[in-house]
Amino acid sequence: MSEHKEHNMLDSKKFIVAVSVVAIVFVCGIWLGFALNDNKIATERKLSINQEVEVRSKAEPDTFKAKIRIQGSNALRALSKLNDEQSESLVQTFNAVSRLIKANKEICSGGSYGYSPEVYYERNRRKVGFSAYQEIVCSFGSEQKSAYEKLLKAVGVEVGRNALLTLPILPIQAIITPEQIDKSTQEMRTELLKKAQGVAKQYSKALKQNCNIEDISFQEVGNTKPQARNGVMAMSAETPSSKVAPNGVSLPTTKEEDLVLSANFIIGCMAK
């Protein structure tokens, strides 16, 4: 009898525990339901604002680019055949110029050269002569102008010693480098972010809600190819090849270029 009573009491305790567990789960389910519902309502109340901002900046060219191009003179073109002495004189001049370029490698590079027969027409008559070339590419800052000018004059002296070669006038271009563009673009991106944050704060104040930037994308606006401006060597185009010796270099006048960057961003606002 006693064992039967104890067994019933044990069953009763198990029943009470089971009922308690069910009750707790039920209450938690109700609470979770309310929480999810509140979250859904809060999400539905969220306000998304799409906006665009733009900033402008200026960049001034700080680099100059130029080509030194040696070419055959009219005397070389008039030759139907090159003798050994003439061929050697061309090679000697080209090698002398190459040494000058190597000594000024911080501002110029290149120096490949060649010469070959050339067919051309003069007064409707077919003629055979010779052509020659050597080309050097230079890039320098305004503070290196004197170094470029000195190099150009030295090249002119070497070319002037050879009647078969000439040094024509070529323009100097002022350019904005990719490095300048990258630096200005990063600065403008930082400015755009600050502007976007300022807009978010304005909305927070006006709506009395918490507004934050949720997404932002930058739009590049053609800042890769600023217009190049030209300058020329102070040398007459009529100077005979035997007298070529540049008297100076005139750098082009630089002008600030407009750079533009815009951004589309999304601001999310929620009740405090």
Image (cartoon, helix red, strand yellow):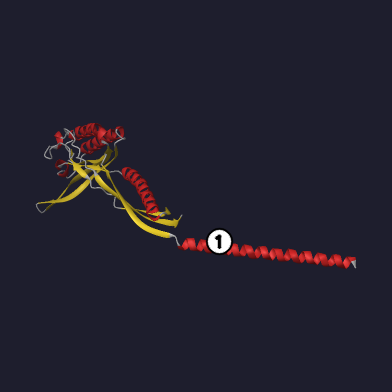
Identified by mark 1, the residue type is: Ala
Picture mark count: 1
Q: In which quarter of the image is residue 69?
A: top left
Q: Where is residue 126 in the image (x, y as percent from the top left)?
A: 14, 52
| Residue 183 visible in the current orientation | yes
Q: Is mark 1 on a helix, strand or loop?
A: helix
**Crowding at mark 1 (Cα within 10 Å: few <14, some 14-19, many 20+):** few
Image point (73%, 65%), residue name? 18
Residue at the spot of label 1: 35
Q: Which of 75 and 242 is in front in this view?
A: 242
Vertical relation: 195 (above or below) 86: below
Compare residues 49 and 59 and report the one nearer the observer: 49
Q: Looking at the figure, which quarter contains the N terminus?
A: bottom right
* Camera sees residue 170: no
Q: Residue furthest left?
A: 123
Q: Where is residue 56 in the image (x, y as percent from the top left)?
A: 28, 48
Q: Is residue 25 left or right of residue 13?
A: left
Residue 55 in picture, x, y percent from top left: 30, 49
In the figure, is residue 221 to the left or right of 214? left
> Is 202 drawn above or below residue 239 in the view shown?
below
Where residue 99 sits, quadrant-wise, is: top left
Where residue 190 appears, as percent x and y from the top left, is 37, 46
**Viewer-proximal residue, 84 or 52?**
52
Asked if residue 45 is positioned above or below residue 62 in the image, the reply reads below
Residue 154 is left or right of residue 185, and the answer is left
